[in-house]
Amino acid sequence: MEASSVVLHSQVLPFGFLVRNNKVSLRHLDKQLAITDYRRHQSLKPVKSPLHCSYKVSPLSLSLTRTRTHLLPPLRCSYSDTTSSDSQNTLLKPLRNLSLDSLKQTLSQLTPIDVVKWSGVLTIAIAATKWTVNLLFNPFFWMYFSWTWLFWPWFVAISLAIYGLYSFRKHSLGEASIFEQLAVVTSVFTWLILVPPAHFNGYLEGWPFAFFFVYHYFFFFNVSVRKRLYGDYYARPHDPKWDVNPPKWYRLLFCVGVMVGHWLAAFEGPELHRIPGGWSNLGVWIFILVALLMQYNSTLYLAKYSEKVVVPTDVVQFGPYRWVRHPIYSSTILLFVTYCVALRAPLSLLFMVAVCLLYYTQKAKLEEALMVETFGDRYLEYAAKVRYKFIPFIY
């Protein structure tokens, strides 16, 4: 059997081993390895292997050549492993170059401005570290931090107010989606109903939560009518003469008055936990149901006799219009009154009624003048028949 030899290289002692007739013999590399073959008459040319690599550990380089036989594939390989110390010592290079002499040289090159600058940086770093450590180990810090859980409703209310103003701007341009319209209403009701009692009581319970949802349901009746009639929530284009409103300053005063009235009710009323429950609130629930039914029926009847909801085509004399000429405004006044009754705030109730009557009287006067101009004697006959504007048998 043909013998094969392999040469290995060691950093300690180079040696090789020889395989001859299934026997292995080891000898030093400085000895020549003689290979005998019983098939000496057959000469084979060495075939170079396509693989070539170099292995370098020391300045000594070693190449290995094999002769192709009938058992071993042709191989010519020199394996090299270059272990570069430069890539491993990149981070340690500044430390290796650091010495006492280099440190002295660096310090000697500092100018007074550099000394002042680095002294200031070092002082600020030490002070900030000391302050942070004292803060983390100060028990009062964690007590103050826990207060944020008490004040998080304020963050929510302020954020909602900012988004409500943004949505109101889009609504004034006619670009607000239904979600943005809802954001406008929700932000207003939050600062009307939830924030005032929470501010004066420190917490919320009872009637503010109930009226928060009642107000939403009440003031979205006109939107629900649009959805019922037209399949969406958007107002239709109409003749602008039917957009009857008092001057802007008058409307602004009304909004401020309504806001002040709700805050006064929260301030005047007793603490929320002292408001009695049970059957004593039966009258409040009756007023709420009356206000909701009056608003819904008034909006529905007005829409049936109107085009695009806001343009009347006839004088409505059915439903709540049989008792008062402006039942929608009456239901709004009743809802505000009910809120003051629920919070046990009689003085705020009187203030709210005065604000609403002053504003809605002016607005009703403009609307009635337009109705007389449009329908003439038909509306005059209706006004003579139904003498009360807002409150049956009173006003």
Image (tube, rainbow, N blue to C red):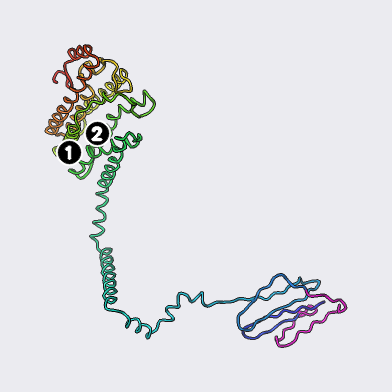
Q: Which quarter of the rendered picture does the C terminus lie within? A: top left
What is the magenta segment's predominant secondary structure? loop
Q: Is residue 270 left or right of residue 86?
A: left
Picture mark count = 2
Estimate the x, y position of residue 178 in percent, counting from the top left.
35, 34
Q: What residue sits right under mark 2 in the picture?
A: 211
- Give the residues in magenta: 19-46
Query: Which residue is pictured at 76% across the width and 72% down the height?
Result: 74
**Where is 92 relative to 282, above or below?**
below
Q: Which mark is residue 263?
A: 1
Return the residue found at the far left: 347
Q: Secondary structure at mark 2?
A: helix
Q: Report the Cα–Cα distance between label 2 and label 1.
A: 14 Å
Is residue 43 a member of the stretch shown in magenta? yes
Q: Is residue 40 visible?
A: yes
Looking at the rendering, which quadrant does residue 335 occupy?
top left
Q: Is residue 283 visible?
A: no
